[in-house]
Amino acid sequence: MNSPNDPETLTICSAKGCHAAAVWVVAWNNPKLHTPDRRKTWLACDEHREHLSQFLAVRGFLKDVVTLEEWERRSAADG
């Protein structure tokens, strides 16, 4: 089993029980807990992107859904 800090683990879908490679970053923020600029992230495979996005959207937490590649580009540019 991979450790939480293993680079391979960091690219696996966040959906419970899924072990597929992540393709998407679902960025969110709970306004009761986080400052407005803070972004928490879940990773998603193609199959779970919509489910994870809807789960957060219903709660008013969803901020952005972008490809993992785009998220990494943004992070590098900010960084």
Image: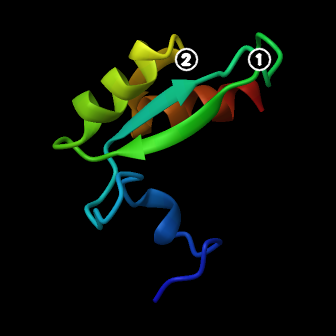
**Residue mark closest to the camera, 2 vs 1:** 1
Looking at the picture, which amino acid does disc 2 mark? Answer: Phe
Q: Tell me: 9 left or right of 52.
A: right
Q: Tell me: 30 left or right of 54.
A: right
Q: Where residue 21 sits in the image (x, y, percent)? A: 30, 59
- The part of the image, by quadrant, that contains residue 44 is top left
Q: Label 2, label 1: how many angstroms apart (C-alpha)?
A: 10 Å
The crowding category of the residue bearing disc 2, from other C-alpha atoms within 10 Å (few below 14, some 14 to 19, many at least 20), is some
Q: Where residue 70 sits in the image (x, y, percent)? A: 44, 29
Q: Where residue 45 sits in the image (x, y, percent)? A: 26, 47
Looking at the image, tell me whether mark 2 or mark 1 is earlier in sequence order.
1
Q: Tell me: 43 left or right of 6.
A: left
Q: Which residue is drawn at 36% across and 58% down?
A: 16
Q: Where residue 79 sits in the image (x, y, percent)? A: 78, 33
The crowding category of the residue bearing disc 1, from other C-alpha atoms within 10 Å (few below 14, some 14 to 19, many at least 20), is few
Q: How many labels does the image show?
A: 2
Q: Mark 1 points at which residue?
A: 32
Q: Residue at x 46, y 89 (%)?
A: 1
**Residue 55 vs residue 13, the one in the foreground:** 55
Q: Tell me: 8 left or right of 39.
A: left
Eyeballing the image, is 8 above or below 25? below
Label 1 secondary element: loop
Looking at the picture, which amino acid does disc 1 mark? Answer: Lys
Disc number for residue 48 = none
Label 2 secondary element: loop
**Residue 9 vs residue 15, the one in the foreground:** 15
Disc number for residue 61 = 2
Eyeballing the image, is 23 above or below 73? below
Q: Residue at x 45, y 30 (%)?
A: 26
Residue furthest to the left in view is: 47
